[in-house]
Amino acid sequence: MERNQRTSFQGTVTSIKMNKTIAVTVSTERNDPLYNKRVGYSKKYYAHDEKNEAKVGDVVTIASCRPISKTKRFRLVSIDKHVVELVKVESAEASLEAKEGSAAEIAPAPEAPKEAPAAEKAPAKEAK
C-alpha cells in the first residue's frame, strides 16, 4: 500500500499520559439496520506522537502505519485545531501583578454608595 492510501481518521485527543503516545477518540455515525436511525459510535486508537506536541482536547489527524507496539498502529499526522486553555482568575491576576512589578500598587475598586436605612416595620398586632 502506498502511504497516501492508508486509512486516516480525525479525532479528539483524550489522553497524553504515556511518553510519545496519545489516545485519540474517533466518533462516527452509522444508520442502524433495524430502526434506520443514526447511531453514534466512538472508538479509541493509540497513536505515536514523536515530539509530544499534542494536548488533551486537540483535534488531530492520525494515519495507519506499521505496528509500533502491541497497541499502537497509528501515527500523528497533524494537529488540526488546538484547544484553548482556560486560565483561573487568581492565577491571571497573580501573573498581571508580577508583570507590573511588586512596587506598583493596584488601585482599590470604588466603593458602592451606602443604602438608605430600611423603613421601620409595621407595629405588631396586639392579641386581645
Image: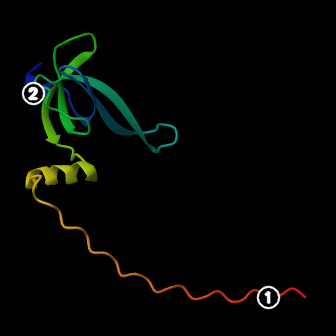
Q: Is residue 18 above or below residue 67?
A: below
In the picture, the quarter occupied by the C terminus is bottom right
Q: Which mark is residue 4?
A: 2
Quadrant where the image shows the N terminus: top left
Q: Are marks 2 and 1 in contact (CB under 8 Å)?
A: no
Q: Residue at x 35, y 29 (%)?
A: 43
> Which three-letter amino acid code belongs to the residue tagged 2?
Asn
At a point 87% along the width and 85% down the height, the residue shown is: 127
Q: Is residue 108 left or right of residue 51?
A: right
Query: Label 1 belongs to which residue?
Result: 125
Residue 55 % position (x, y): 21, 35
Q: Which mark is residue 13?
A: none
The image shows residue 15 at horizontal and vertical percentages of 29, 29
Instruction: Mark 1: give few (<14), some (14-19) or many (20+) Cα within 10 Å.
Output: few
Marks 2 and 1 sit apart, C-alpha to C-alpha, by 89 Å
Camera-side residue of 55 and 37: 55
Q: Position of residue 41 (x, y in %)?
A: 39, 35
Query: Relative to 120, is 33 on the left or the right?
Result: left
Q: Amino acid at mark 1?
A: Lys
Q: Tell me residue 12's x, y (percent).
A: 26, 37
Query: Residue 126, relative to residue 9: is it above or below?
Result: below
N-term-proximal mark, 2 vs 1? 2
Q: Nearer the viewer, residue 121 or 37?
A: 121
- SS for tag 2? helix
Relative depth, front residue between 16 and 110: 110
The 10 Å Cα crowd at callout 2, few under 14, some 14 to 19, many 20 or more, is: few
Taking the view exactly as shown, the residue that stands out farthest to the top is 70
Q: Residue at x 65, y 86 (%)?
A: 121
Please indicate, yes or no, whether residue 87 appears anywhere in the rendered image.
no
